[in-house]
Amino acid sequence: MSRLPLSTVKTTFQTGDRPSQTDYENLIDSTAAQATDLGTSGNNENTISDIQNATVIDNFDSTVWRMVKYLISIKKTSAGDNKFYATELTILVDGTNVNVSEYGTVDTNGNIGTVSVSMAGTTVSLTIVPVGGQTPITLRYMRTGLKA
């Protein structure tokens, strides 16, 4: 299975030349690899800005992933504020229940958001809720996981 950066694959299709069978296989293999690599390929680039209300920031299929770990950073720097919050979550799904351990929590100036985990069917969702008028907030997260 070829595993190329999507930018490399994209360049191949933009040259104006007729794509080869190998080019198509590289495209299929690279996108399939990215779709299943929950814990790699730039996932620390996930940023959600201007959160005003409860917002689902990520979800995953519990039939595919047994354990997922999140590193979460929340900030509020608007209106003269300089508030930051960081936490780590480990989520373990046993097929029926979702079990969560939150640890390593650090904040600089009071809680500016809460993170919750829920499961509906086989979809596990991670939700952020701004606390008491602390809006807008910006959230960045990184995730990694182990398959079921």
Image (cartoon, helix red, strand yellow):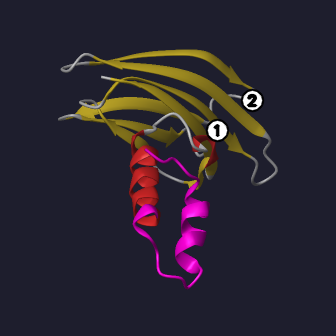
Between residue 65 and residue 90, name the one nearer to us. 65
- Does residue 77 appear in this view? yes
Q: Residue 92: x percent and y percent?
A: 36, 17
Q: Residue at x 60, y 62 (%)?
A: 7
Query: Looking at the picture, does residue 57 appear above or below residue 93?
Result: below
Q: Dot 2: what SS?
A: loop
Q: Residue at x 65, y 28 (%)?
A: 86
Query: Looking at the picture, does residue 110 appear above or below residue 81?
Result: above
Q: Residue furthest bottom?
A: 16
Residue under pointer 1: 74
Query: Looking at the picture, does residue 134 appear above or below residue 63?
Result: below
Q: Are marks 1 and 2 in contact (CB under 8 Å)?
A: no
Q: Residue 140: x percent and y percent?
A: 62, 42
- Does residue 134 appear in this view? no
Q: Please state which amino acid type lies under the numbered disc 2.
A: Asn
Between residue 16 and residue 89, name the one nearer to us. 16
Q: Which mark identifies residue 109? A: 2
Q: Is residue 136 magenta?
A: no
Q: Which residues are magenta?
A: 1-22
Q: Dot 1: what SS?
A: strand
**Gap between marks 1 and 2 measured at Cα:** 12 Å
Mark 2 or mark 1, which is nearer the start of the sequence? 1
Q: Is residue 88 left or right of residue 121?
A: right
